[in-house]
């Protein structure tokens, strides 16, 4: 689905590389959590995938299509919602009328569902919306565009607690077998229940890329491990551990925040 090979990229002003011979393969039909510390290149990677930025060397292919060529075939199957949104000074209805024809599988039914879930009117003025409502409006359009690949950069920034719950419900309802969603976020707790794949980047490299199913099979996340302890975290309820799972350990859900800390601590 998405194949990144030997990617090198840096910004000329800083003179530093963000990625150095970086490779990553993402399969379809999954919801990925793209995680990393500040300035590790999460947003940059999404912009490279979408063709908004071009690799200095290496390749990125989406379904075999080079991302930097931004071909019609590529743009029909990919949609990026960036973290920062500068929206035009007209109504959402007009926005839909202008841009929906670019997406052959655009679903008005899905758009109506998303707007209803978020409690947004169809004729809202985009430029006057709060940051949270801008995120909800553009997420609604992005889901309705029904592209095979959806890239969301910090989609829950600006959302209050009820809106974050709405966001999870909308994503879950609009996910289908022909879609791949990649969510870059610092707010892991907002999306943890949605994820079936975890990708963590740092130090210009890939730190982990695994399904939550495989992680739950290999590791135990909880208070009383029987296998080799890899990471310990103190809490009000007592110590919590990541350990290699043995036959004596029950299968636990993946604690993504603990996993993130464990993986990054290994790099120090």
Image (cartoon, rainbow, N blue to C red):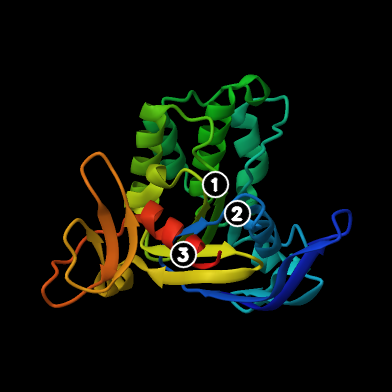
> In the image, residue 154 lies at what x, y percent?
55, 44
Q: Based on the displayed image, in which of its 4 quarters is residue 12 positioned?
A: bottom right
Looking at the rendered structure, the secondary structure element under dot 2 is strand
Q: CA distance from mark 1 to mark 2?
A: 6 Å
Of mark 1 and mark 2, the one earlier in the sequence is: 2
Which of 71 and 191 lies nearest the eye of the viewer? 191
Which of 94 and 142 lies nearest the eye of the viewer? 142
Identified at 14% across, 69% down, the residue is 249
Identified at 66% across, 57% down, the residue is 41
Looking at the rendered structure, the secondary structure element under dot 1 is helix
Q: Is 110 situated above or below 112?
A: below
Q: Based on the displayed image, in which of its 4 quarters is residue 162 positioned?
A: top left
Q: CA distance from mark 1 to mark 3?
A: 32 Å
Looking at the rendered structure, the secondary structure element under dot 3 is helix
Q: CA distance from mark 2 to mark 3?
A: 30 Å
Q: Is residue 53 left or right of residue 84?
A: right
- Which residue is identified by label 2? 79
- Which residue is identified by label 3? 263
> In the image, residue 144 lies at what x, y percent?
49, 46
**Badge 1 vs badge 2, beta-carbon distance below 8 Å:** yes
Which-is-in-front pick, marks 1 and 3?
3
Q: Is residue 204 left or right of residue 52?
A: left
Q: Based on the displayed image, in which of its 4 quarters is residue 123 positioned?
A: top right
Identified at 21% across, 42% down, the residue is 237
Q: Which mark is residue 142?
A: 1
Crowding at dot 2, Cα within 10 Å, few <14 / some 14-19 / many 20+, comes out as many
Of mark 2 and mark 3, the one earlier in the sequence is: 2
- Which image quarter is the C terminus in? bottom right
> In the image, residue 247 lies at what x, y percent?
13, 77
Q: Is residue 204 visible?
A: yes
């Amino acid at each position: 689905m998405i194949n990144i090979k030997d990617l090198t990229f840096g910004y000329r002003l800083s003179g530093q590389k963000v990625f150095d011979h970086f490779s990553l393969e993402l399969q379809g039909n999954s919801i990925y959590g793209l995680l990393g510390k500040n300035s590790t290149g999460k947003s940059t990677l999404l912009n490279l995938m979408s063709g908004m930025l071009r690799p200095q060397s290496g390749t990125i292919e989406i379904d075999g299509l080079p991302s930097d060529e931004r071909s019609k075939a590529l743009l029909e199957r990919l949609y990026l919602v960036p973290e920062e949104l500068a929206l035009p000074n007209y109504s959402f209805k007009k926005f839909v009328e202008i841009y929906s024809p670019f997406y052959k599988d655009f679903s008005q039914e899905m758009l109506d569902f998303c707007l209803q879930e978020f409690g947004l009117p169809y004729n809202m003025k985009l430029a006057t919306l709060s940051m949270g409502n801008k995120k909800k409006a553009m997420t609604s359009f992005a889901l309705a565009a029904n592209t095979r690949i959806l890239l969301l950069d910090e989609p829950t920034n600006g959302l209050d607690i009820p809106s974050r719950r709405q966001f999870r419900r909308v994503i879950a309802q609009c996910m289908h077998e022909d879609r791949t969603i990649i969510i870059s976020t610092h707010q892991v707790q907002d999306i943890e229940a949605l994820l079936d794949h975890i990708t963590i980047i740092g130090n210009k490299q890939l730190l982990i890329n695994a399904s939550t199913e495989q992680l739950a099979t290999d590791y135990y996340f909880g208070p009383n491990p029987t296998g080799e302890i890899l990471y310990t975290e103190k809490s009000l309820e007592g110590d919590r551990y990541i350990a290699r799972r043995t036959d004596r350990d029950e299968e636990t859900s993946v604690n993504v925040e603990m996993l993130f800390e464990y993986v990054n601590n290994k790099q120090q």
